[in-house]
Image: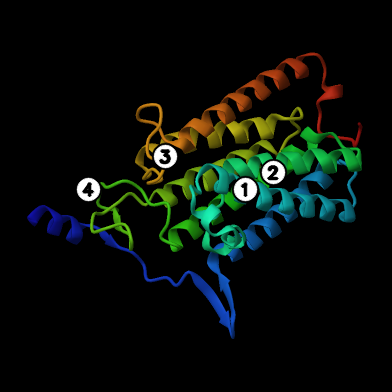
Amino acid sequence: MAAAALHAVAALPFPDIDPVAVRIGPLSLHWYGLAYVAAFAIAGLLFRHLVRRWNVGLSDDDVMEVVVFSIAGVLIGARLGYVVVYGGGQYWRDPLSVLEVWDGGMSFHGGLVGIVAAGLLVARRLKVPFLRMADAAAVGAPVGFFLGRIANFVNAELWGRPTDLPWAVVFPGAGPRPRHPSQLYEALLEGAVIFVVLWSLSRRERPRGTLLGWLLVMYGAFRFAVEFVREPDPHLGLVLGPFTTGQILSVPMLLAGVALLVWVRRGSSQGPSSTAHGGRGT
């Protein structure tokens, strides 16, 4: 009892933040939904800036089409990925709850599959190399990671494992024990750090696929590391020994990023004409 009381005193209280940002009559705007809107808007502006800087040859209408495809790919892929991998049986019992994305429940790995599929479709439609578009989109992606993890914190979900560290937080619904604010760790690493690195890389011409490769490598590595202090989903627990489902899904992502970077490096050693960002090409 004394130890529990000490933990409670040492821990930081969870900030009293209403998950609903704005209420207008029966309409409620959640921070989680606003995070997605802001992320797509900022990422779209960054994408437009980069395709112009790299002289890709996309008009503003083309950029808007890419953004619309991306939104559809992310939302559908992320939600279905969560439902299939993390949702358990709750969505079978209440199928309409699949549509309640404002309450959280989005899988990054599912969103990645969705946006890649959407990107392949729109790249073919616009006759632009997929990797050229993917590099431009990669720079804005960490903005979404950052805002999404902040929204997870506001929603008091996806908290970390118990800890005695002085910045531990007692989350409502997670019991009395202080826990790692793992959402904030992920916001810093997967969001801020990756954005700074990719934005720096984007400031000079790189072979196609470079930025996408580094995005996959960094996200996979950071996610794998943070999962050690993040509470596993209770209905899934640990798998393959000490690892979580998130870690298992991050390994192929990391390996794909390494493979892409190796392929890009080999291709660029044969000459810049087929791999440079500039020009619309085929």
Estimate the spatial distance between the alpha carbons at disc 3 and disc 1, rounded to whole Å: 23 Å
Mark 4 is surrounded, within 10 Å at the Cα level, by few (under 14), some (14 to 19) or many (20 or more) other residues, namely some
- Residue 151 or residue 75, whichever sits in front: 75
| Disc 3 + disc 2, Cβ < 8 Å | no
Which one is in front in this view, the residue at disc 2 or the one at disc 1?
1
Q: Quadrant of the N terminus?
A: bottom left
Which one is in front in this view, the residue at disc 1 or the one at disc 4?
1
Residue 2, image x and y in percent? 8, 56
Of labels 1 and 4, earlier in sequence is: 1
Amino acid beneath label 2: Gly
Please state if 41 lies on the left or on the right of 94 as rendered: right
| Disc 2 + disc 1, Cβ < 8 Å | yes
Residue 214, image x and y in percent? 62, 32
Of labels 4 and 3, earlier in sequence is: 4
Residue behind mark 2: 114
Residue 99, image x and y in percent? 62, 61
Amino acid beneath label 3: Val
Label 3 residue SS: helix
- The image quadrant that residue 44 belongs to is bottom right
| Disc 3 + disc 1, Cβ < 8 Å | no
In this orientation, does residue 107 appear?
Answer: no
Estimate the spatial distance between the alpha carbons at disc 4 and disc 2, rounded to whole Å: 39 Å
Q: Residue extending furthest front?
A: 93
Residue behind mark 4: 164
Amino acid beneath label 4: Asp
Label 4 residue SS: loop
Residue behind mark 1: 80
